[in-house]
Image (cartoon, rainbow, N blue to C red):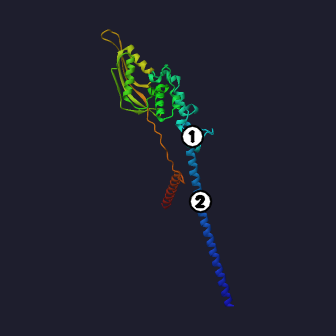
Amino acid sequence: MAAKAVGKRFRISKLQQQMMLAVLGASLVLGVSIVFSIHLIKHMGFNAKVISSRNEAIENYGLAIKNVGICKDKDGDGKISDKELKDCNPQAIDVTSIPGTLRYNVMVNMAKNTDLESVGRNSQKQCYDDNHKRIDFTAAYSKSTTDDERSYNLKMMKMCSALRAIPDALPAQKNDEALLASLNQIFLLSGFEPEQLAPGTNYKQSKVIGVSTIPIALTVKRSEAETMSIISNIERSIRAFSIGSAQIKWGSNANDGSSKLDLLAQGVAYYSAETNVQEKMEVVRAKDDKKKKSGASSTKKTNDSANKTSNETKK
């Protein structure tokens, strides 16, 4: 009987060990499965985030290409597909066939704008054919077959169309000599040379984004009519000037007693600051750094509050 009891107890103990091992094995498999599932879910979420950011970047890139007029939206779906981008040749596109794009607005609308044309300087001889008719260099640019032809026609378009008024009104670079030449021309139109005309050195950004200023100082000591003529010509100039401060002094000439008007003015002229297009690199992370920092800050505040409470309890 004792032997049977011992044997029975041994079999029960062995069965318990087997059950315990089975439970441990199942727990281990379950734990590994849970960890693997969590990792897989995080990995899938991260991949979804990367794909979403990639698709957004591709969509924005295609939209920029479409708005500028680099490629044509042939299927009319409002997007530039990979195939359209691959087959795209910006130089082969007829600019007149892409209305609403930046290229069309500049090379067609602005180039033929009558208001700009009315204030532009006189066109040069190269802008006209033998019949004294202005050459349409926009059409010539669209029909160009080589890079040299396109470069020449684009240069002539800027010089002969209404676009020539834009660099006169708002130059694309800071050029003190050109500014002094413009102001000197204004004085010559009034019939005399300036007593003092000098650019400053304190260049500043204007309130308009992308537009900077060149400080200027001018002195006029002439008759009232001549000084007022200068002021009037500056106001009518296509180049934009702003007078910040001015000192005006009326007097009379000692020789003939005629009225005299002295003007000492400080102002600025404007030019377009250099603009660069840069690629932006975006790093996609599994977790948002802001949330992480916010959590760390919150944990720190909680710990500080707990330490403060503990210290007050000790007191």
- Badge nearest the viewer, 2 or 1: 1
**In this rendering, does residue 124 appear at all?**
no
Q: Quadrant of residue 63?
A: top right
Seen as rendered, the residue at the extreme left is 255
Three-letter amino acid code at the position of disc 2: Leu
Three-letter amino acid code at the position of disc 1: Leu
Q: In this picture, is 266 found above or below 29? A: above
Q: Position of residue 103 (x, y in %)?
A: 53, 33
Q: How many residues crowd mark 1 within 10 Å: few (<14), some (14–19), many (20+)?
A: some
Q: In this picture, is 307 found above or below 182? A: below
Seen as rendered, the residue at the extreme top is 256
- Looking at the picture, tell me which residue is in the foreground, 59 or 210: 59
- Looking at the picture, tell me which residue is in the foreground, 312 or 301: 301
- Looking at the picture, tell me which residue is in the foreground, 228 or 107: 107
Q: Are marks 2 and 1 in contact (CB under 8 Å)?
A: no
Please name the residue shown 69% across and 91% down the image: 1
Q: How many residues crowd mark 2 within 10 Å: few (<14), some (14–19), many (20+)?
A: few
Q: Position of residue 199 (x, y in %)?
A: 36, 28
Mark positioned earlier in the residue sequence (2 or 1): 2
Q: Position of residue 313 (x, y in %)?
A: 50, 60
Badge 2 is on which residue? 40
**In this rendering, does residue 186 appear at all?**
yes
Q: In this picture, is 289 found above or below 200? A: below
Badge 1 is on which residue? 63
Secondary structure at badge 2 equals: helix
- Looking at the picture, tell me which residue is in the foreground, 250 or 44: 44
Give the numbered dot on residue 118: none
